[in-house]
Image: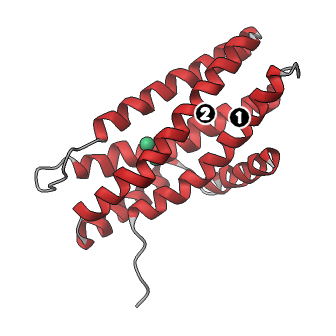
Amino acid sequence: MTKMQKPTEMLSAEHQNILKLIAALEKECGALESGKPIDRAFFTKAIDFIRNYADKFHHAKEEDILFVELCKDSVSMHCNPTEQMRHEHEIGRGFVKGMEEALNSGSRQKLIENAQGYVQLLQEHIYKEDNILYPMADEALDAQMQKSILNEFGNAEKKRFAKGVKEKYIALAKEFGKRAG
Ligand SMILES: [Fe+2]
Ligand SMILES: [Fe+2]
């Protein structure tokens, strides 16, 4: 029998796609700081990726499914950090809104500040999830619960993303990865 994928493994794989965007964003901020004009097409794609893939697709699985399970009384997880993770998702949404406003008004400094804020927040956030929260979740959830979370992840994907949309964002992540070099 093949080993069942853990829900946290699925989420960590999604982090790898998000990190490609983060790397491209970091590089673009460096270029902006050295005087490169604002690349509107890039930032528009980056914001679309964050809102749809990182937030609607990935953060929703955490907030609506995994974190909910971890907070159930039947799951004894020591020092439950999901509130902090939700809070960081909210801060991230603020940075994205700031990036969008900066893009619309053509404000370079505001764009750099919000993009860099998002980069730093997400780098730390993903590190904490991959190295602290997910291992805690793996410990706390038995095989049956993990299986049902995976099923819910699958249903959430179908409900939120039409056929082919996930693939579109994975291709976009690859593009970001190439851009980051
Ligand atoms: Fe998260
Ligand atoms: Fe995450």
Please name the amino acid that badge 2 sits on: Val
Q: Nearer the viewer, residue 137 or 72?
A: 137
Quadrant position of the N terminus in the picture: bottom left
Sequence-first tag of 2 and 1: 1
Q: How many discs mark residues in the rendered view?
A: 2
Circles 2 and 1, Cβ within 8 Å, touching? The answer is yes
Residue underneath mark 1: 26
> Which percent across, then down, holds residue 50?
60, 37
In screen coordinates, is 122 left or right of 60? Answer: right
Q: Residue furthest bottom?
A: 1
For the question of whether residue 173 can be seen, the reply is yes
Residue at the image position 59 percent from the left and 54 percent from the top: 16
Residue underneath mark 2: 119
Q: Secondary structure at mark 1?
A: helix
The CA distance from mark 2 to mark 1 is 7 Å
Q: Residue furthest right?
A: 36
Please name the amino acid that badge 1 sits on: Glu
> Which percent across, then down, holds residue 52?
57, 40
In screen coordinates, is 54 left or right of 139? Answer: right
In screen coordinates, is 92 left or right of 80? Answer: right
